[in-house]
Image (cartoon, helix red, strand yellow):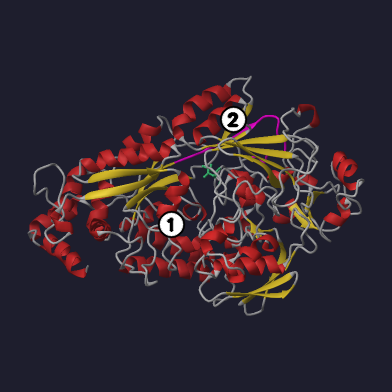
Amino acid sequence: MHRKLSTLTGAGLLLGVSALAAQAQMVEPTTPPDPPAFPAQSEPVFVGISDILEYRALPEYHEPEWVTEKFVKTGKLPPVGERLPKEPMVYKAANMPDGIGDYGGTLRHVIGGRPEGWNYIAGQSQGWGGIDIGMMECLTRTGPLFTIRAEELQPMPNLAKSWEWSEDGHQLTMHLIEGARWSDGDPFDAEDVMFYWEDHVQDPNVTPLNGASPANFGEGTTLEKIDDYTIRWTFKTPFPTEYLYQMAYGNFCPGPSHILKPQHPKYSDNTYEEYKNAFPPDFLNWPVMGAWVPVEYRPDDIIVLRRNPYYWKVDEEGNQLPYLDEVHYRLSTWADRDVQAVAGSGDFSNLEQPESYVEALRRSAEETAPARLQFGPRTIGYALQMNMSANGWGEPDERAQAVRELNRELDFRKAVTMAIDRQRLGESLVRGPFTAIYPGGLYAGTTYYDKESTAYYPYNLEAANALLDGLGLKDTDGNGIRNFPDGMADGQDVEITLLANADYNTDRNLAEGVVNMMQKLGLRVILNLQQGASRDALYQSGRFDWQVFRQTPEMVTVVQNTAMLAPTGPHVHQFHRAGPDGTLDLLPFEEELVEIVRSFVRTQDLGERAELMRRYQRVFTENVYSVGLTQYPGALIINKRFANIPAGAPIFMYNWAEDNIIRERVYVPEDRQQDYELHPQTLPGEPGSDGPLT
Ligand code: GLA
């Protein structure tokens, strides 16, 4: 391996000094151009967290009348007061855009993914589009933070209703909601939390879907149960408030231990694979802490969810939430989600594929349009990521190994980035002021972005080609494709596979654009288009040379998924994870990024944090850690009959819009309710039973 690497650098050294100097001239980075102006269409109302919610007991509680009549009076369900925790979460009416809501109503989502099963915490996808977000509740919550005043910005309480730090800042004691229950009536307590932590985060054989690993919470961090409703974290560094963000959606949403534990390999004869697959999508009435429970599943058609009778949140008048009785997830395509939301046969879409912007905008501008469409900030972005592991992650063959070694050469990454014509790439998706040049790293327009610290290598095909010549990558057989130098992959053509998600037109189009642009560089890039779940599996196991990736929140907010900003642990990063021996072969600049990210987590000083992120951006972009492709705004499309949609809710920031809108408070005014319910006046049944309880 090392022999080959030196072959490559050796070839570079064969170039004369003057040629190198001339070349260096051509590749001087500049700062990126400013993105075209695109003002967001509505601004959030900024408030404090305590303006939104509190935890307290109310003198009386209410529920939909049919629940009392059909289920409580017949003894099928205890009275609502007994189903709620001692002190439920109470949403304040003054912060609800349209006030206290009406019961009833159905929200019809459309999604492009397919459910693998319900075992999210063992790595199964439910198909995205918010279905998992809606079923799960997490220790803290971040989605609605877009509306929180900067001075008061910290994660919102959720399953953890409060917390306090020890004097030295190494211990964090959290108080869980007391007396809340899973949707099947089983108590929720510290056992669920510890089962998630010990047997999922800490167990290297299981990875929750979002990839939660010990690194997300700091190496050496421990968690213990103090009593049924108290847990205590111990951290190596003082006051790492950062980790409160990691306890939100994605990384710390416990599953129902009463159902899961008996199937976990530690407590049964199951293998890890059997455990993961123990709850397929047709296992109905899966117990949740979220507002709705899956009661019907028809493959490639629909998942229907009904209200959770044990949901632990209420409004100020004591009405148990959610207001909406039923939620649908139509199993279709992502593009169809836009089409249906605009047409009114679906209710919700994150308009995020620029190919449909013009048509969606045109239709939504008509007075008779069934849905409102509102653009937010430019927080959707794509990058080309290269697999940086040269020590075996994903078990590369000889060709793939040679590609990994190229990926680790700065001149190679520079050549690739300079061969990307970002203007053209953006315009190939949509014309107009939407897409912006994205060099990589933190997004322009976000809190920690600093233009002066951003190195941008403008499109320059000639210089890009010169760099590859310099690396000794010559087209030795005259077929238009460069060959590996002698001693690397038998000097064969440089062929690189590009993994991309086939479920999105945008991912396809960007990937095809990359393929074409690389051809001009003499690199043969072969598209590996895979449907969502298999794409995820390939990238999670490191089986890719390059991938086109729609980025996760760390590039927007920095404070969310912070550990993923660099390879801070063996299995935490998107394109550089440990080889089979558990070690990471980091390049010097990656070590620097890791150190910057660790320092960021250690300090609460805002000035220091800003400075660290400027350094991060500089090191990241100068070294072309990933090749930015494009960055653009998304729009939230919601049917006009829905009330309590907060102003300025972005489709993506700390989380997706499905969380940002505070779905449990959303309602349909009674006079606008339509007959969309498929299982009216029913509630979730026994876990694993056939359907809803009638
Ligand atoms: C998918 C969609 C996003 C959003 C998320 C929610 O990724 O593309 O718009 O709905 O699911 O997890």
Asked whether, in this view, residue 453 is left or right of residue 288, the answer is left
Indicate the amino acid at tag 2.
Answer: Ala
Say which residue appears at 14% left-offset and 42% top-offset.
480
| Residue type highlighted by circle 1 | Gln
Q: Which mark is residue 341?
A: 2
Classify residue 591 as left or right of residue 316: left
Nearer to us: label 1 or label 2: 1
Measured from the top left, where is residue 669 in percent x and y? 78, 32
**Helix, strand or loop at disc 2?**
helix
Rendering quadrant holding ligand 1? top right
Q: Are marks 1 and 2 in contact (CB under 8 Å)?
A: no
**Residue on which disc 1 sits:** 540
Q: Which residues are magenta?
A: 632-647
Tell me if residue 362 comes above or below residue 243 in the rendering.
above
Q: Quadrant of the C terminus?
A: top right
Residue 639 sits inside the magenta stretch: yes
In whole angstroms, how far apart are the C-alphas of marks 1 and 2? 32 Å
Q: Position of residue 319 (x, y in %)?
A: 84, 46
